[in-house]
Amino acid sequence: MICPPSRIATLGHLDKFLPIVGLYARDRNHVKPGHSSVSRLSPAIRHRLITEEEVVAAVLQFHPFGRVEKFIQEVYWRRYWKSWLALRPEVWIDYLKSLTDMVEDPAIRRIEDSRSGNAVIDHFANELVTTGYLHNHARMWFAAWWVHEARLPWQAGAAFFYRHLLDGDPASNTLSWRWVAGLQTPGKTYLARRSNLEKYMAPELLDSLSNGLGEFEKPQALQPDLIFKPPITRPDWPLEILDLSKTTGLWIHEEDLSVENSVLASHSFSAVLVTADAESWEHHRFPVAKKQWLSDALQDATTRAERHWKVPTILENLSPHADALLRWAKSNNLQQVAALRPEVGPLNDSLTALRATLSQAGICLILIDRPEDLKIRHFATGGFFQFWERLRKSLVIVSTVSAATAPQQLWMDLPR
Ligand SMILES: Cc1cc2nc3c(=O)[nH]c(=O)nc-3n(C[C@H](O)[C@H](O)[C@H](O)COP(=O)(O)OP(=O)(O)OC[C@H]3O[C@@H](n4cnc5c(N)ncnc54)[C@H](O)[C@@H]3O)c2cc1C
């Protein structure tokens, strides 16, 4: 049911979903066993086994833009959140700090163990822990109940989701929880109402969970104490350029697992290293199933990289990635290591120390952005719909050409 941890299987999964995308706007809010009205592609998109552009190009080869605009908009919610956080990285740092300062609360433990006493919440906590996935509406209901009914810190709820979701993402997760808590759009909280659950939950779920609905009868918003609009503190990134005269290795990490479909595809490398951010997996207490999914996805990226670059390629998923990188760079006599830039999140947090370690050994780390990400990052200075309007102008180019003119090549007028 959940998106498989390989690129080829993800493409197959997307293919099967393509006919259903036409019904997405009508059916996407319904929470039903199996989740067949939504794509369940999020773990693959999150770790870039497939990119947003590839998903949207495939959809537009199958449907006219007008019929699938809602789906494309949702796909770009993810890029909006990522771009928004990239411009304001302190929001992530503050979130991590508040987790460090938090004291253990047995009420949180009970909810996470599906013992909250509310049948709806226990059902979704159990689904999250056992499958690594929750439907968007279930995430919203769960988070709203956590913040406004149980009155627990949103950060602890976000940490629970981040730990278990296979698509757990520093931007989409942290900012969605902030949105529910009324921090993201000042003055707007999200409340889960009984009528909404009754409208969108499948009858078989409603029947078995009905005694949990009472707590959704008259939700009262918990207003945040302090509403503060985070400023843009990082409007630009220094452009890093590969020195083609240096012996260079490629580093592939779990933030982007299809590097052979990026601007780095045509470069030559002496060696390739694929690493897991195992320290952060432990720090955030990822469960075994999630570690397995990530390990399989990393193995898949390793196989594809070896086939593409045809140089020695190894996967290191146990030792800390800084140690693994240094050992590998030295043993291959590298002068330079290239990678796609990890966006805000645990891996990005480790970059300063990593650069220092490599530079002590005379090796420089060069981080390259995907041009398609760079181009739209600056659209996220305001709200989503402002972002979408700016982005949409590039998207409609595709909808006005016939299928015979290979829309993929015209996609967004972006350098590839
Ligand atoms: C409290 C909360 C926490 C969330 N945490 C995460 C998270 O950690 N990682 C994550 O990828 N999404 C997160 N989301 C957004 C959304 O719920 C999931 O992306 C979506 O449910 C994934 O299922 P799907 O692939 O079947 O989505 P579909 O409905 O099929 O959508 C297709 C793709 O669009 C993107 N997308 C859809 N809706 C959203 C959205 N609201 N925000 C951002 N991207 C979206 C995803 O990449 C998704 O795979 C969160 C939402 C809430 C309310």
Image (tube, grey):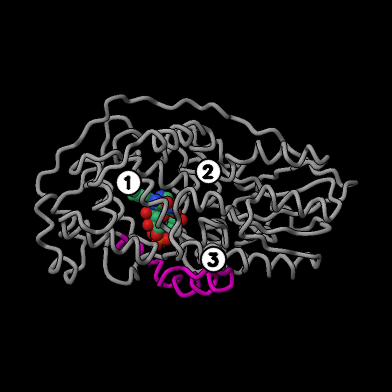
Q: Secondary structure at mark 2?
A: loop
Frontmost residue, 245 versus 123 = 123
Q: Residues within 10 Å of mark 2 (few under 14, many from 20)?
A: some
Residue 369 placement (x, y as % from top left)? 66, 45
Residue 165 placement (x, y as % from top left)? 41, 57
The answer to whether one can see residue 72 in this image is: no
Q: Amino acid at mark 3?
A: Ala
Q: Is 365 situated left or right of 229 in this image? A: right
Q: Which residues are magenta?
A: 1-28
Where is residue 220, by image quadrant?
top left
Residue position for label 1: 157
Residue 34 placement (x, y as % from top left)? 32, 72
Residue position for label 2: 345
Q: Is 219 situated left or right of 267 in this image? A: left
**For marks 2 and 1 on the same chain, the one whose residue lies earlier in the sequence:** 1
Frontmost residue, 4 versus 74 = 4
Q: Residues within 10 Å of mark 1 (few under 14, many from 20)?
A: many
Membership of 50 in magenta stretch: no
- Asked if the beta carbon under badge 1 is closer than 8 A to the nearest atom of ligand 1, the reply is yes
Residue 42 placement (x, y as % from top left)? 46, 59
Where is residue 261, by image quadrant?
bottom right
Residue 58's label in the rendered image is 3
**For marks 3 and 2 on the same chain, the one whose residue lies earlier in the sequence:** 3
Q: What separation in Å lies between label 2 and label 1 (alpha carbons)? A: 17 Å
Q: Is 49 situated left or right of 147 in this image? A: right
| Ligand 1 - quadrant of the structure image | bottom left
Numbered disc in front, either 3 or 1: 1
Q: What separation in Å lies between label 3 and label 2 (alpha carbons)? A: 29 Å
